Image: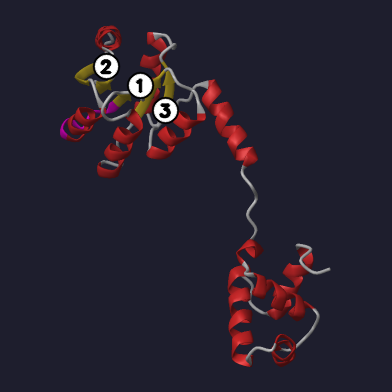
Amino acid sequence: MIRVLFADDHEMVRIGVTAYLSAQPDIEVIAEASDGAPAVSLALELKPDIILMDLVMKEMDGIEATKQIIEQWPEAKIIIVTSFLDDEKVYPALEAGATSYMLKTSKAMEIAKAIRSTYAGESVLEPEVTGKIMTKMREKPVVHLHDQLTEREKEILLLVAQGKTNQEIADELFIALKTVKVHVSNILGKLEVQDRTQAVIYAFKHDLVE
C-alpha cells in the first residue's frame, strides 16, 4: 500500500482527489494538510511514501515546505500538483527537491499513475515542464576553466605562451619573481594542467593567444 500525504489549501480539491485515490486498491491517503507548515510537520512525523504538494498556499508555500522536508528528510518523494507552469514556480520547486511535477488539470487517474511511478523511483514531469528544463539547459552558458583566471593571470599566461621565463615576466611587469611564480602556479591549478607547456597548449587551443 502506498501511503500518501496530500497538502492543498483548497478543501474541495483535497476532498475530490482524496476520494479518488482512496478508491485505489494500492493507495491510501493517510493525512491531509491545508498549508505548508502542517505539511512539513505531518511529513516528518508520518514519513509517507509520497507527498502530494500544492505550490500556492497562504502561510507557507509548497516550495518552502518542500525545501524544509527535503532538508530534514532527504529520502522524501514529493510530487508537485499545481496550476502553475511559470519559471518562478517550476525551477525553484525542482531545485528544492521535488521528484515529480503534475498539473491540476491532469486527470485523477494520471495523478494516481504518477504516484505509482514516483513510488517506484521514477520522475514524472508534465511535457511542458520537460520542455522548459531542456530549454534552460540549452541556454546554460558554457563555462571554461580559463574563465576562472584573473586579468593578471591571463596577462602572465600570454607572456608564458610567448616563451618568456619567470624572470623576464617579472622584469616586464615590474613585479617580484616570487609573485610571478605564485601566479604561474595558480594558472596551472585553474587550468588543471601539469606544467607550463600544457598551459601554453591550452591557451592556443582555446584561442587565448593571438
In 3D space, how far apart are the residues under numbered discs 3 and 1 (Cα atoms)? 9 Å
| Amino acid at pointer 3 | Ser
Mark closest to the chain's N terminus, 3 or 1:
3
Quarter in which the C terminus is drawn: bottom right
Label of residue 27 in the image: 2
| Amino acid at pointer 1 | Ile
Q: Nearer the viewer, mark 3 or mark 1?
A: 3
With respect to residue 107, does 181 lie above or below? below
| Label 1 with label 2: CB-CB less than 8 Å | yes
Q: Is residue 193 left or right of residue 105?
A: right
**Crowdedness near tag 1: few (<14), some (14–19) or many (≥20) residues, C-alpha within 10 Å:** many
Residue 93 at what x, y percent from top left? 41, 33
Mark closest to the chain's N terminus, 2 or 3:
2
| Amino acid at pointer 2 | Ile
Segment tinted magenta in the rendering: 45-50
Looking at the picture, tell me which residue is in the foreground, 116 or 209: 209
| Type of colouring | secondary structure
**Residue at the spot 64% in from the left edge and 85% down from the top edge:** 180
In 3D space, how far apart are the residues under numbered discs 1 and 2 (Cα atoms)? 9 Å
Residue corresponding to mark 1? 115
Report the residue that reaches farthest toward the right. 210
Residue corresponding to mark 3? 100
Q: Is residue 63 left or right of residue 35?
A: right
Q: Is residue 134 left or right of residue 102?
A: right
